[in-house]
Image (tube, helix red, strand yellow):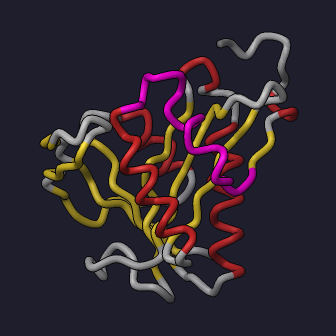
Amino acid sequence: MTLTNISTEQIIIRKLQREDLPKLEWEGELIHFRRIYAQAYAQYRSGDAVLWVAEDPEQFIVAQVFIQLTSHRQELANGNQRAYLYGFRVRENYRSQGIGTRMLKIVEADLLKRGYTSITLNVGRDNPDARRLYERHGFHVVAPEPGRWSYLNHLGEKVEVNEPAWRMEKTLL
């Protein structure tokens, strides 16, 4: 799947719909996150999250970003002022085309309408390109994050993740 024959202006950024869930797996590449996607969708349905996708004219999901509005970790999301951005992915062939920037602007505008004043995220310490993107858009590092978490994959197996990160924050204007 490549960007040839498609201009980035043809990419539609919209809220996720239930029928998009299988498309988030990117033809099997991200199948191991199936349960995470289902849980995020349940949070979306309950009003605790907002899920966004970018879709090309052929109806491929080329990017995704999830916003958690509430969390047991108040420093990430507190339900009324601070939201947490996670699961932000852009397919490799669609990177450096402005899609991530467009998604960030839409997410921020939506959060402002909801009354939120700040947004947090974690970026892997081994991902300087993503950190630079966030810094260009006004985020700054506020704390280190150990990046230890686990999830059940699509087979029900527990997967332990260790990805040290930086917590970044931005005040929304």
Which stretch did the figure color magenta? 14-31
Q: Which of 152 and 116 is in front in this view?
A: 152
Q: Is residue 29 magenta?
A: yes
Q: Is residue 19 magenta?
A: yes
- Please tell me in which quadrant of the rendered image residue 92 appears: top right
Q: For the point 18% across and 50% down, which residue is it?
A: 150
Q: Position of residue 131 (x, y in %)?
A: 40, 44
Q: In this view, does 65 lie above or below 74?
A: above
Q: Is residue 128 above or below residue 37?
A: above
Q: Nearer the viewer, residue 89 or 29?
A: 29
Q: Can residue 162 be seen in this view?
A: no
Q: In this view, does 100 lie to the left or right of 163?
A: right
Q: In this view, does 161 lie to the left or right of 137?
A: left
Q: Quadrant of the N terminus?
A: top right
Q: Position of residue 62 (x, y in %)?
A: 64, 31
- Please tell me in which quadrant of the rendered image residue 58 appears: top right
Q: Where is residue 170 in the image (x, y as percent from the top left)?
A: 48, 68
Q: For the point 34% across and 76% down, which residue is it?
A: 71
Q: Which of 34 and 91 is in front in this view?
A: 34
Q: For the point 68% across and 12% down, which residue is it?
A: 2
Q: Which of 166 and 40 is in front in this view?
A: 40
